[in-house]
Image (tube, rainbow, N blue to C red):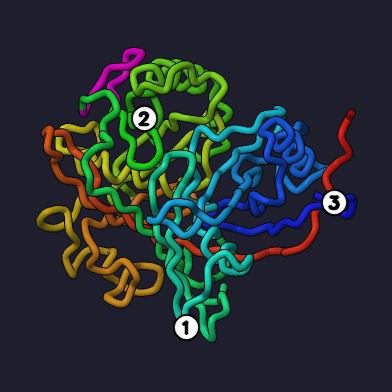
Amino acid sequence: MTSGGLRCALMRGGTSKGAYFLAEDLPADRAARDDLLLRVMGSPDPRQIDGLGGAHPLTSKVAVVARSGDDAADVDYLFLQTGVETAEVSDRQNCGNLLAGVGPFAVERGLVPAGDGETTVRIRMLNTGELAAATFPSPGRVVSYEGSTEISGVPGTAAAIVIEFTGGTGDRPLLPTGRARDEVAGVEVTCVDNGMPVVLARAADLGITGYESPAALEGDAALAAGLREIRLAAGKLMGLGDVRDTTVPKLTLLAPPRDGGAVCTRTFIPVRCHTAIGVLGAASVAAGLLLADGIGHDLAVLAGTGDRLSAEHPLAGTGDRLSAEHPLAGAGDRVRIEHPTGFLDVETVVEQGPSGSPYAVRTAVVRTARKIFDGTVHPRPSDS
């Protein structure tokens, strides 16, 4: 950083918004980096009035990008969740929404050359060590954000960004506890991790329908206390230790679908109710639904033989539903996750690993991203 400020791009990635930086533009020392980012975002302050943050966890995010030293990746991506009312910066989770902007950002910063018409950027997610590939249009070798793809929770349309997560080794357990069902704080749950640690529970088991608005759920003090008890206990079961000061695991409450999807969800991060659902959270939900012994399998509507869609299923329609030309059409087991502002379609394939435990062979989603500004941000002066 210079006295004139810090180079930064503000981008919408999926249904989140965050500040994107090159790693080389930030301090190498973690404490100095975190202090700088808090001042950039305007934290701690419930309004984040003196920074880039949007007064909500979904808009108080940071992506740090660098060339990768891994032959399997083009760039490294570190996600950082900055606190809104707290002076905290956490790298204990990933963010699949901001991931949507990493490929275009890497091309625009010169880390990866653009392809002629289409570009694929291989991304190593440093938070988890996993790999993803993002493919997006680049006509004339220039990133294009314009397109006709709609995603729920975002007004208007933009270019499709197809993100594929590939596992296939079976060495990362889909079920961190080793079981498809556990009882936690008196509630039956499925603990699953397909890129994001998530605890699945039936909404009815917590005394709600699962169709309430996020505002109504956030105002339910008894529900919040119950969710906190489940999350703390599940975190230990999942090998995450004491999760009191982290945003993982996520909690997703499940209810039967209402709008032609597979399941209806309400997700908490950790007590704020998500107005949509995170990409990696949705990937974990989808994988969890495909487990015959999981708590969500019986209430979910999974279409067609082998959970694939038939031509008559609502997803095979037109408009914002999937058609044969959709980037995900025919790619695998497709699960539509309903959330408070619409839906998110996930393609996932779950198989049994060498040990007999299930693992995700492939997961893919379609997101969009948009560059809001690219320029210089001036952090709040240091208190020191």
Where is residue 243 drawn, in percent x and y? Answer: 49, 21
Q: Which mark is residue 116?
A: 1
Where is residue 76 drawn, in percent x and y? Answer: 51, 51
Vertical placement of residue 273 versus 379, above or below: above
Q: CA distance from mark 2 to mark 1?
A: 42 Å
Q: Are marks 1 and 3 in contact (CB under 8 Å)?
A: no
Magenta-tinted stretch: 180-189
Q: Which mark is residue 234?
A: none
* Res. 136 in view: yes
Q: Amino acid at mark 1?
A: Asp
To which residue does mark 2 refer?
Answer: 199
Name of the residue lying farthest toward the bottom: 140
Q: Secondary structure at mark 2?
A: strand
Mark 2 closeness class: few <14, some 14–19, many ≥20 residues within 10 Å: many
Q: CA distance from mark 2 to mark 3?
A: 43 Å
Where is residue 1 drawn, in percent x and y? Answer: 80, 49
- Residue for point 85% across, 51% down: 2
To which residue does mark 3 refer?
Answer: 2
Of label 1 and label 3, which has the lower sequence position?
A: 3
Q: Amino acid at mark 2?
A: Val
Q: Amino acid at mark 3?
A: Thr
Vertical placement of residue 290 versus 32, above or below: below
Where is residue 234 drawn, in percent x and y? Answer: 37, 20
